[in-house]
Amino acid sequence: MVNVGILGATGMVGQRFIQLLDKHPDFDITALAASERSAGKRYEDATTWYLDEAMPESVKDIEVCETKPEAMSNDVDILFSSLPTDFAAKIEPAFAQDYIVASNASAMRMVPDVPLVIPEVNPEFLGLIETQQKNRGWDGFIVTNPNCSTIALTLTLKPIYDAYNINKVYVSTMQAISGAGYNGVPSMAIVDNIIPYIGNEEEKMESETLQLLGSFEDGVVKDADFKLSASCHRVGVVDGHTEAVFVELDKDEDIDDIKQTMANFKGRPQELGLYSAPKNPVIVKEEEDRPQPRLDRSADGGMAVTVGRVRKDAAMDNSFKYVLVGHNTVRGAAGASVLNAELINKEIL
Ligand code: NAP
């Protein structure tokens, strides 16, 4: 077994980590860390548990430690990070001197020697680890996963990008409240309302997607070459991001072929049979009123993205549009890091 710890263990994403790692066949939780407010307490006493499923018995008595390398037990190989970005920027590099850090935070995502990875999309970017360790003299390393809305979008674009030539993508998101963390959006702001701004979200979607679909040659990442425009909005849904996507190709393609291309998509996690890999990363629905967050966010344990309403777009030449739903704290956060760690465990450790 590989011993793992969770940084930010008491938060929304931290709790998902605990849910996904409890009973994991390869990973065993041996350390939980959070802020000074929680440090020194039993995990059960430090945490306001928000998931439907009960808190696993195995973590209740673990003493939460401070988030600093000297407070961490030596008995840990991989640290999953769900820390606030500003703090992650300072502390993740300190941990990476000795530990493998699989991070959800955006702090290190766009750093040139830090791989930003979705295992089905760009597993080869893990080749940057060697460069990172050489550049920095670390025994450990940092691997990041993208932003929650980017992951869902990129999983659906990858089969399209490989099969056809994309000219342009527009995406409009309807993002769940849990994406902002437990204390993120006050109920008085979101009930009976839509908030048409999520700080830095559009920039992250635009830059991360192009990087993930880009190439990795001679140790260098080169962005994919098409235009992407995102508009991001917070809506009163607890979990599950919905996105309306509009794609312009360089020539007209058959809609049924496009649907088949998405539905048949499989990547390295499926080939390797990784424990958290969904059978199909993209599920294509034919019902005219799907996908919906309440009905589709938990597809394949929350690790698959559901697509529906794939149809021609009359406003642009050679274009089509669709709607997707992805679970923001599972596939979009904790599940993404766990799948990255499973890939690392299988191919690198
Ligand atoms: P959250 O619910 O607010 O949880 C934050 C966690 O970080 C808590 O465990 C908190 O501990 C800990 N923390 C806060 N300040 C700290 C400090 N100074 N030192 C040490 N620990 C500290 O946030 P979240 O939604 O889980 O998000 C966590 C990270 O994941 C963020 O970077 C976010 O952008 C990213 N992310 C979130 C989602 C999502 O859907 N929610 C998706 C993708 C990425 P205490 O309980 O002790 O305060």
Image (cartoon, grey):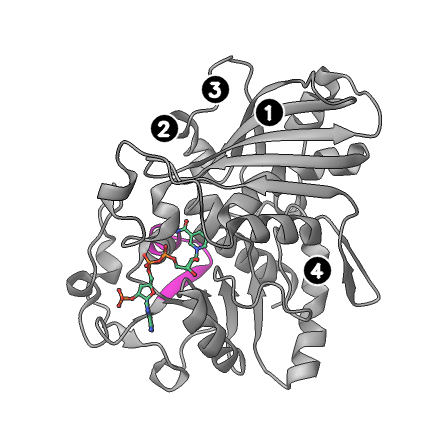
Give the amino acid type for the residue marked by disc 1 in the picture.
Tyr
- Determine if residue 122 is in view: no
Quadrant containing ligand 1: bottom left
Q: Residue at x 49, y 55 (%)?
A: 338
- Identify the residue position indicated by label 2 in the image: 294
| Cβ atoms under marks 2 and 4 closer than 8 Å | no
Which stretch did the figure color magenta?
Answer: 18-29
* Count of residue discs: 4
Residue 147 is one of the magenta-drawn residues: no
Q: Nearer the viewer, residue 80 or 36?
A: 36
Q: Residue at x 46, y 51 (%)?
A: 333
Residue 22 is one of the magenta-drawn residues: yes
Task: Say if 54 sits above or below 103 in the image.
Answer: above
Task: Say if 232 sits above or below 126 in the image.
Answer: above
The percent position of residue 54, horizontal first and vertical second, equals 22, 46
Give the amino acid type for the residue marked by disc 2 in the picture.
Arg
The answer to whether residue 68 is left or right of residue 263 is left
| Cβ atoms under marks 4 and 1 closer than 8 Å | no
Element assignment for label 2: helix
- Identify the residue position indicated by label 3 in the image: 290
The answer to whether residue 308 is left or right of residue 5 is right
- Identify the residue position indicated by label 1 in the image: 322
